[in-house]
């Protein structure tokens, strides 16, 4: 570990202990090495506009809107000639409107980007390469946690500066656990395996209750009349399954591919096939909310409404539960599988549209949004973990002030080999189009994983030939 990793880890560990964490060895999140980058050619600095300019900045997360609006207000106070209008749109409309805007020439100057999207934008030449600007302004890249900065770099080019990081945990309904006789300690120590589902499957059985009050372990349980589901996930999960299935599949030793931008995928691996079929079987048994209902209600909304005892979700949703849950809740560690606990380690960044009329001013905004000052501001709102240690410190203090114990997320980030990176790849939308219908059909009981995933994986790998 280098010195910046140790600095970040010491801060995370200190605050995790303050929040009641049980404490483990301090380590960096596991990472996959990015391809070797070639030196980017020198580029002339974009010319600043002579007068006042107006910029559009888009993001999709309503929970983060107030925090980033405050950052923009602070930026504007120091740069009165740059007016930035912040727009928030829901996930689906957000990406549709950005893609349409890039075609019609009306995209936002700056927008929050995602690792599933940016390689396609970059390949089409729709994003500004900010690496020359990073070098020109001597931006300190060492302030970003782990390998977050490298996720946004490829072949000597860079398309964003990190904003935040996240891990996955289990949010639970305290009242439902208590009524079922499941202790929080039991949940935190749950195990999982492909043979019988481990103690996690037993816990889900206890927490799944039909309309007559019988749980799923009772022979008289009626799975056609379920009043309370043991677990709610967010859907079929697409090609990453970030909050849905990745945190169990990875505990078997399974991996998506061999590293960033690799061209061979392993959705045909027996370990992934069995893991995904386990989910489908648990839905059929009534222990996990069925896909049709999740699609209709929304996973987190259903949990907040009291329709299930457990919900797998990312740290970016902590504030949503605090604002919308109608019952006492807490956050538990992920189940421990054959190779330990595993969570995806992900992060967002802001990118600049190539079509902006004001690239220099847009760069100044992006640079500020990824600065220590903005990180501290965002952290103080207690909605996400910023990508810089100063912001993490502010976030942990904010969560503590709200009486929210978030050590389930921070301990996962610190655990040795406890994280893996989001699968960054070319052809992401094509992979999604192939895989998603197959995963949905399995969860709907229309197909068996072993029958359809090998062919889907072969079709995915053919995209790279």
Image (tube, rainbow, N blue to C red):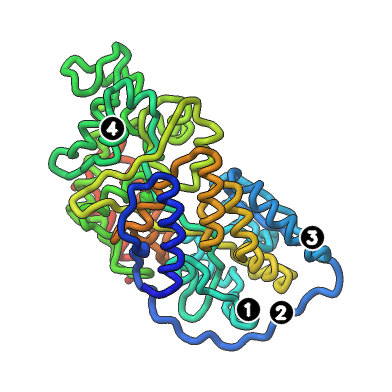
* Secondary structure beneath label 4: helix
Task: Tell me which residue sits at (64%, 48%) in the image.
Answer: 65
Q: Identify the residue position indicated by label 4 in the image.
A: 283
Task: Tell me which residue sits at (65%, 58%) in the image.
Answer: 101
Residue 322: x %, y % from top left: 52, 35
Mark seen at residue 77: 3
Upstream in the sequence, badge 4 or badge 2?
A: 2
**Left or right placement of residue 451 versus residue 296 in this view:** left
Query: Are discs 1 and 2 less than 8 Å apart at CB?
Result: yes
Front residue of this view, candidates 110 and 366: 366
Q: Is residue 285 above or below residue 192?
A: above
Upstream in the sequence, badge 2 or badge 3?
A: 2
Upstream in the sequence, badge 1 or badge 3?
A: 3
Mark seen at residue 46: 2
Query: Are discs 3 and 4 less than 8 Å apart at CB?
Result: no
Upstream in the sequence, badge 1 or badge 4?
A: 1
In 3D space, how far apart are the residues under numbered discs 4 and 2 (Cα atoms)? Answer: 54 Å
In 3D space, how far apart are the residues under numbered discs 1 and 3 (Cα atoms)? Answer: 23 Å
* Secondary structure beneath label 2: loop
Residue 263 location, quadrant:
bottom left
Task: Tell me which residue sits at (35%, 66%) in the image.
Answer: 31
Q: Is residue 158 above or below residue 444?
A: below
* Secondary structure beneath label 3: helix
In 3D space, how far apart are the residues under numbered discs 1 and 4 (Cα atoms)? Answer: 50 Å
Q: Identify the residue position indicated by label 1 in the image.
A: 133
Residue 280 location, quadrant:
top left
Query: Are discs 1 and 4 less than 8 Å apart at CB?
Result: no
Task: Tell me which residue sits at (83%, 65%) in the image.
Answer: 81
Query: Foreground mark, 1 or 3?
Result: 3
Residue 376: x %, y % from top left: 60, 57
């Amino acid at each position: 570990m280098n010195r910046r990793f140790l600095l970040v880890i010491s801060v995370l560990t200190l605050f995790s202990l303050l929040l009641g964490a049980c404490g483990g060895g301090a380590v960096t999140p596991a990472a996959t090495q990015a391809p070797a980058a070639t030196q980017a050619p020198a580029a002339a600095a974009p010319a600043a506009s002579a007068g006042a300019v107006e910029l559009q900045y888009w993001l999709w997360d309503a929970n983060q809107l107030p925090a980033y609006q405050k950052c923009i207000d602070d930026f504007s106070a120091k740069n009165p000639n740059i007016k930035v209008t912040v727009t928030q749109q829901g996930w689906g409309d957000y990406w549709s409107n950005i893609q349409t805007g890039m075609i019609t020439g009306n995209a936002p100057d700056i927008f929050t980007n995602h690792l599933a999207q940016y390689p396609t934008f970059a390949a089409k030449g729709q994003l500004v390469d900010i690496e020359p600007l990073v070098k020109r302004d001597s931006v300190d890249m060492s302030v970003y946690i782990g390998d977050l900065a490298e996720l946004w770099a490829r072949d000597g080019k860079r398309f964003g500066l990190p904003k935040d990081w996240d891990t996955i945990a289990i949010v639970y309904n305290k009242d439902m656990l208590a009524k079922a006789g499941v202790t929080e300690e039991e949940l935190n120590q749950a195990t999982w395996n492909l043979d019988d589902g481990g103690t996690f499957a037993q816990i889900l059985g206890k927490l799944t209750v039909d309309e007559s009050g019988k749980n799923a372990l009772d022979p008289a349980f009626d799975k056609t009349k379920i009043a309370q589901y043991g677990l709610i996930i967010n859907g079929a999960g697409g090609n990453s399954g970030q909050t849905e299935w990745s945190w169990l599949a990875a505990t078997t030793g399974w991996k998506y591919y061999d590293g960033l931008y690799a061209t061979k995928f392993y959705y045909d691996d027996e370990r992934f096939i069995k893991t995904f079929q386990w989910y489908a079987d648990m839905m059929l048994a009534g222990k996990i909310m069925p896909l049709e209902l999740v699609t209709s209600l929304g996973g987190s909304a259903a949990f907040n409404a009291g329709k299930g005892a457990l919900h797998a979700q990312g740290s970016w949703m902590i504030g949503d539960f605090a604002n919308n849950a109608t019952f006492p809740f807490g956050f538990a560690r992920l189940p421990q599988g054959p190779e330990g606990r595993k969570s995806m380690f992900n992060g967002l960044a802001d990118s600049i549209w190539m079509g902006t009329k004001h690239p220099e001013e847009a760069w100044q905004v992006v640079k500020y949004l990824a600065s220590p000052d903005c990180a501290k501001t965002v952290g103080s709102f207690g909605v996400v973990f910023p990508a810089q240690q100063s912001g993490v410190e502010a976030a942990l203090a904010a969560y503590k002030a709200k009486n929210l114990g978030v050590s389930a997320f921070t301990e996962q980030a610190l655990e040795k080999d406890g994280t893996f990176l989001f699968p960054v790849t070319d052809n992401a939308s094509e992979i999604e189009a192939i895989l998603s219908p197959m995963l949905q059909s399995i969860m709907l009981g229309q197909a068996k994983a072993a029958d359809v995933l090998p062919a889907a994986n072969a079709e995915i790998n053919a995209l790279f030939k």
